[in-house]
Each structure stands twice: as C-alpha cells, then as structure tokens.
Image: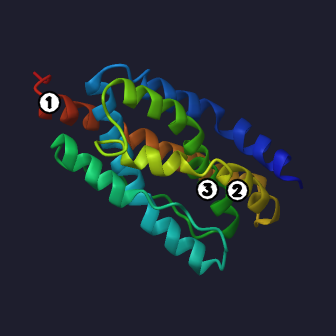
Amino acid sequence: MQSWARRQILRTGTDVLHRRLDDQLGDLTRVQDYIRYLAGTFAFRCALEPALTTALADAGQAWRILPLSAALRADMRDIGHPLPVLPAVPDLTQRAGLAGALYVVEGSALGARLIASRAAALGFGTDHAARHLAQQTADKSRWRSFLTWLEEAPFDPHISVQTAQAVFHMAIEAHGPSQAAAADTANGHGG
C-alpha cells in the first residue's frame, strides 16, 4: 500500500475529529486564544512525547519524533501560565498503531505554519512564547520524510486509524474546556 493511500485512509478516518479540534482551537487572533492553544499543546505534547518515543524504540522503528516539550516549557514560562494537567495517553503498544499516532503528531506541523504567523501577529516569536512553533516548522521536508516512512511502516487500516482517533481525542481533551478555563483565570478573564 502506497503512503498516499495510507495517508488517505488516515485522513478519512480522522476527518471529523480533526475538524472538531480545529474548531475548538478557533482562529487564534486574540492573545488569550493563543495562550489556551499553548497550554493545550503543552499538555498534549508533554504527555505524548515520552510515551511515543518509548513505543517507537520498543517497536524497533527508525522514525523519531521532534521533541517540543522543552521549548513548550520555556514558552509557558514566558507567559507565566501555570502548567496544565496532562491528559491520559492512549495505548501505543500495537506496532500498526504507531503510524496513526505519528500521522497526528507529524501532521500538526502543517497547521503550525499558520499558527506561527498568527502568533507573530500577536507578538509571540522564536524568543518569546512561540519557540515550539519555530522548531516545529523549521524542517520543511519533514512531512515528506514522514510519508516515506509511512509507506514502509507496519500498517493496519483499522488499528492505525483507531490509534490516530485516540490521539486526536487526547488532543481534544488537552485543548478542552478545563484548560481554557484555567487559561482565562490565569489571565484575568475568568469569572
């Protein structure tokens, strides 16, 4: 199965959840919206990265995620936001599921390009509260490299999509109402 076919299977299987997450994030044109995004992304990546790194090593896979946790931690310090609660990580023990999990993680860099430009318009950049975006968008060839890896990776349409959906659910939880309320309260917008 070619990577474009695998990509299409994953895209179709996660489309509703992807749109739900995009809707939840909104257009990020206000500072408090960006802070909510940052808190949610911190929670999502800081929970998922160690588990995904371990799962890839245990499965003997050569692909390595781009770690953003340290940059996200620095970004959170910049805004003085309390560190959010980390969501539960879905099961990553099935080798075919890694393709689905990585589809979500690596695909997020595509959206990060738009988010980076919106963050810059709000005054956030590579040295203040948007380091992770600079890291995530630096390698323009990473997505193509991932698609090459996807072509050879263990893949099962059901398991891979199911894991991708679980990772999207995790991202939705990380960016959910409880994180938004904490961001608003921390920035004097709660009530």
In this view of the protein, which residue sits in the foreground, 35 or 15?
A: 35
Residue tagged 3: 102
Q: Residues within 10 Å of mark 3 (few under 14, many from 20)?
A: many
Residue tagged 2: 146
Q: Is residue 110 left or right of residue 52?
A: right
* Amino acid type assigned to the residue bearing label 2 in the image: Phe
Q: Residues within 10 Å of mark 2 (few under 14, many from 20)?
A: some
Q: Nearer the viewer, mark 3 or mark 2?
A: 2
Q: Is residue 80 left or right of residue 97?
A: left
Q: Quadrant of the N terminus?
A: bottom right
* Amino acid type assigned to the residue bearing label 3 in the image: Leu
Q: State the separation of the CA atoms marked 1 and 2.
A: 38 Å
Q: Quadrant of the C terminus?
A: top left
Which labelled disc corresponds to residue 187?
1
Q: Secondary structure at mark 1?
A: loop
Task: Specify which label sits upstream in the sequence, 3 or 1.
Answer: 3
Q: Is residue 149 left or right of residue 97?
A: right
User: Looking at this rendering, what residue extends furthest in the right direction?
Assistant: 1
Task: Specify which label sits upstream in the sequence, 3 or 2.
Answer: 3
Location of residue 49 in the rendering, given as x and y in whole percent from the top left corner: 45, 62
* Amino acid type assigned to the residue bearing label 1 in the image: Asn
Which labelled disc corresponds to residue 177?
none
Q: Nearer the viewer, mark 3 or mark 1?
A: 1
In this view of the protein, which residue sits in the foreground, 189 or 92?
A: 189
Location of residue 33 in the rendering, given as x and y in whole percent from the top left corner: 32, 26
Q: Is residue 156 above or below residue 95?
A: above
Q: State the separation of the CA atoms marked 3 and 2.
A: 9 Å
Q: Is residue 92 visible?
A: yes
